[in-house]
Amino acid sequence: MKLYFVRHGETDMNARNMFYGWTDADINAKGISQAEELRAAFRDIHLDAIYSSDLKRALHTAEIIADGRPVETISDIRELYYGKWENRTWEEMTEADRADWQKWRTDWVDLVMPEGESFMDFYNRVIAGIDRIIRENKGKHVLVVSHNGALSAMHCHLTGAGPKGFWNFNSKQGHYSAVWVSEKKLTYDCINYPLCKEKTETVYVDMDSRPEDGLAYMIHKSDRDCNTIWTGTRVEAHHEKAEYVEIMKKHLDFILLEKEEPCPNWYAVPALSVFAKDSKGGYFAKRDGGSCVYYVSSDGQVTYLAEHFRKYLQMVIFEQENEKLQKFAQEIELQKSETDLRRFVCPAYDIQLFANRAEAEKQVHIHELKEFMEIEPPKRIYFDSEKMGKTPEIEGYDIFPAGKSFDPFVMTCEENGFTSLQRKRGISLIFEGNIPKLDFYPVPKLTLFAHDGEGGYFAHGGKDLDSPIYFISKELECWTLAGDFRTFVQMVVFEPDWKEKITGEKEALQETEADKEAFGMLFGLSAPERKLSKNIHREPYYKIFETIEKAREKACIL
């Protein structure tokens, strides 16, 4: 069967960034326009059935798309119930219930939000609903209209990611996703296929034109108003123990590459980092900057294998009754999956291979990094977020907040991972009632949450710690550290010398691997598969000025 997934159109509460799970809000004018565009797209698509959440915003969207066709409602696929947090903006909720919010954010699977629904009750309810739809419509084409959280739960269930993968999926309004489902295999046809008129430009940039250490360097989307896709092919060396390399080569026909090995003679769009080959002339690769594993056959066919390298090993090792492979699995702490991982293997239609860059450029224009960075950015005006709470509107300009705010933690008396973070790594969280007074002024805005006791501060650029994490040095330079707070903690716990790339000075800590593992357990973290501090780089998007007056010399700040 084929399932089409659609998130309801925009509501006024979406526009205000509110939590409103079971609140029965209807879609607004923009949401109606999004649904009408989806109706035009689905007019020529055969649908045997249409299902919707029973909440008004989903049902209204479904009825517009259905265009007279019957719609069946299922309450099981409605959104998570937020309890006391219903009908609050992000800011209102974090201010009123900061302690509960901090607890829930660190343990959202097991903790129940105040007077709300537990995540596992929500998750089990939603998968019961989608399982019923699949069971009753085998071999058919079905449209499901629901909510962002509920759709994420469905994707987790179908892909085998489970509850822990919940935050990896995001369904955009005005888009749809499509997936083929059978008893043996699951194949995504498209994810968040865009129909809405507010499309951003996609710019292709050759990966060989960026610095060698620039794997984590990305052009900031909001600064260029476009999506950046790297192109090309590189060899990425993997460093494993010699005995592991030999086992994989002998029993799995999996030969890890060395850095100096020649690159395959094809050009990938998007870019691929090749890290292994087999005896048949095929290569194993990852999307540049990502973790998903692909196989490129000798005839140029690209196949998606697994979401990361360990998952691929998990799939191929336990397919064989081989004593050495089973021992290898024990040594690397790998267990057999309860899910049939082969059902996720599918053609990678989103990756194209060309003989060379010239052939690729017949289909897409590929920039050099220097050329692209010289493209004139849109006109920008900043407003002082420290004094102006609301974003002003000026026709013809993009307006962004500047300045700093604080994301303080609630002080507790108990010894935990965060107090250990201060004691062992010198990273002190900023607590409520102890917020420092600082003169420096970031452009755009940054939110500070910790300091290093030596004049350096840690910050994020979004609404919470799931955003990228930055370091502001005492020299007022901004550095990108990690993609989110969890990865940041994993880095500082297992790589205590992480700051060497910034200061040039190496930390002289005497810690064993066992010490680090015990420290990591306080956060539920294990050692990373690769060195995370390699991705630290100077952040060109954020500028740190001594004062707002200095900032105004370089930027237009209201």
Image (cartoon, grey):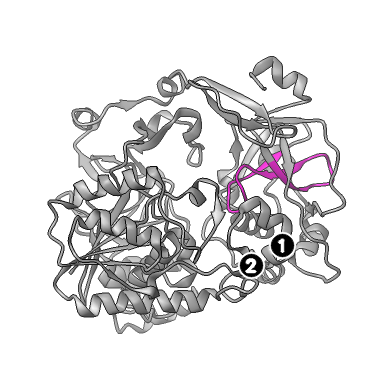
Q: Answer with the quarter of the image where residue 64 lies.
A: bottom left
Mark 2 or mark 1: name the one nearer the start of the chain: 2
**Which residue, given by chain and number where applicable, does mark 2 sit on?**
84
Q: Is residue 291 left or right of residue 175?
A: right
Q: Which residues are magenta?
A: 447-472
Q: Is residue 452 left or right of residue 544?
A: right
Image x and y of residue 132, in percent = 29, 79
Kind of residue sitting beneath label 1: Asp
- Pick the quarter of the image with the N terminus: bottom left
* Residue 479 painted magenta: no
Taking the spot 58% from the left edge, 53% from the top edge, the residue there is: 466
**Does 426 sit above or below residue 514?**
above
Q: Answer with the quarter of the image where residue 558 lies.
A: top right
**Which residue, given by chain and number where applicable, does mark 1 sit on?**
97
Kind of residue sitting beneath label 2: Lys
* Residue 470 painted magenta: yes
Task: Please state which of residues 242 and 213 is positioned toward the viewer in this rendering.
Answer: 213
**Does 471 sit above or below residue 540?**
below
Question: Can residue 446 be seen here?
Answer: yes
- Callout 2 environment at 10 Å: few (<14), some (14 to 19), or many (20+)? some
- Callout 1 environment at 10 Å: few (<14), some (14 to 19), or many (20+)? few
Image x and y of residue 297, in percent = 20, 54
Task: Please state which of residues 461 and 512 is positioned toward the viewer in this rendering.
Answer: 461
Asked if the residue under mark 1 is in contact with the one under mark 2, i.e. CB atoms within 8 Å, the reply is yes
**Does 489 sit above or below residue 358?**
below
Image x and y of residue 45, in percent = 14, 55
Q: What is the C-alpha distance between the residues marked 2 and 1?
A: 9 Å
